[in-house]
Amino acid sequence: MPDSRPTVEADDSPSIDLQILDAQVRALQRNVPSMVVGTLLTAVATVHYFSPVMPEGLDLRRWFAAMLAVSVVRIAAMWLWRRDPAVGRRPAYWARWMVALAVLTGLIWGSLATIYMPTEQSGYRPVMASLLMGVSAAVVVSQVTLYRAFALFLVAMLLPAMLSFAFLPGDVARMLTIMLAFFLLLLLVGGRQSSEASKRSLRLQMELRQLARAEEHARLSAERANAAKSQFLMNMSHELRTPMHAVMAYAQLGVTRCNEPKIRGYLERIHTSASGLLALLGDLLDLARLETGRMEFRIRPKDPLLLVERIAAEFGPQLRHRDVRLEVVAAGELPLVPLDESRVAQVLRNLVANAFRHSPDNGLISIAVGVVAGEQGRELVLRVRDQGVGIPEDELESVFEKFVQSSKTRSGAGGVGLGLAICREIVSAHGGRIRALGNDDGALLEVVLPAPETTQVEDRPAVAA
């Protein structure tokens, strides 16, 4: 079945610079309605205020008509921008539109101090200069995000006014020229700083988004790879178990029917090796089932001491062969504990097998069983201790990772590092925990399982998550 989960393509997004420019254009377009309304209201007030003092032959209504036309074009450009299906892919195109309209608007405002200059006798030239500076200050808020549009608007508006006042006689005109020049320089420098700060903030946001997308892409890829690996392990384990059973059956048949000791020894080795390989395949299958959540757990109230004693009895012949002693120590009367007997038995077998494998001849293995009051309520604690080489302090956690063994037991003891990883998965599925504890004399592993006061547990399978 094809994977229907969403994927993230790292190279499918525009560059950060394009994303920043798109964000700047969007911010400017969001301000268009308020900018147009403010511009037209100011233009109406300008026509009403300055019309009586205009030189003969100059009518501000034409100027207002030009301002109205530019405002209509600005609204139309915003409407087209919103309906552009590829707007995020070509912000430079719309930025050019914004810059051109800003220059045109600035020139219309600047014409007040050139074409429509009040007469010297009216005394309204300082008022007009103040109007232009007020409009410039308002533009700082609305257009400074896109610095090119902001700067060209100011230059198109204030530079013609400065030149117009510069060629007029008198101290007032000279003062107005200096004032406008200083104001223009101040706005350009301050606008540049504000625009750069906004750009840095946008760049940081874009980079964080790219990192988040890359992390999500990596997470999804890892999940798919892990699922594929688990499915592969399950399939291969199933497929290999059948021929391995056949190999063991024929090897056992040869052992029972062959009379030549040398050939019988070969067959026994084949049977032993096949048994080990079959056990490994079983571990791989269990691990895959646990990782994919397909292993069922039948949780029922069980006597933990009887379970421990049964596992200890299973190892009796092997223990006697090497004179290794195994003792079970129970701390008082133990209650029934909800658990999956076969799976917890698998955990205990693995821990005892590890302890036996690394114990010296005539050594001692102890299994301590008790109930304690934990942070989450009553808990069953099982501790398996041996007198082997132990586990280094810096490896107490890593030995539970898949295909990882302790540096002291990595060679000569067999195994591929799956046993403890499977034990942790099984214990976790029971809501418990397993860990290796520091111990000066051998290894010490502890299993903790919940042991609630009530033992009324539903008799139904629970699927590991």
Image (spheres, rainbow, N blue to C red):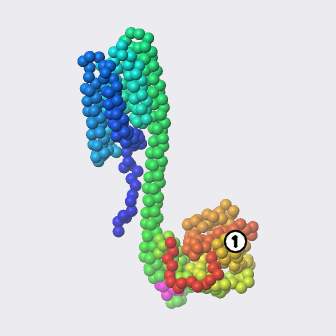
108 lies above or below 237: above
Judge whether residue 182 is colored magenta. no
Residues shaded magenta:
249-255
Q: Amino acid at mark 1?
A: Leu
Question: Could you tell me which residue is drawn at 60 percent across and 67 percent down?
Answer: 400
82 lies above or below 63: below
| Location of residue 105 in the rendering, given as x and y in whole percent from the top left corner | 32, 29
Could you tell me what secondary structure mostly forms the magenta stretch? helix
99 lies above or below 329: above
Which residue corresponds to mark 1? Answer: 444
Can the viewer see residue 34 in this picture? Answer: yes
State left or right for residue 387 relative to residue 264: right
| Location of residue 87 in the rendering, given as x and y in whole percent from the top left corner | 32, 44
Mark 1 crowdedness (10 Å alpha carbons): few <14, some 14-19, many ≥20: many
Question: Could you tell me which residue is drawn at 72 percent across and 70 percent down?
Answer: 442
| Location of residue 130 in the rendering, given as x and y in whole percent from the top left corner | 42, 23
Question: Could you tell me which residue is drawn at 67 percent across and 71 percent down?
Answer: 375
Q: Quadrant of the N terminus?
A: bottom left
76 lies above or below 411: above
Element class at badge 1? strand
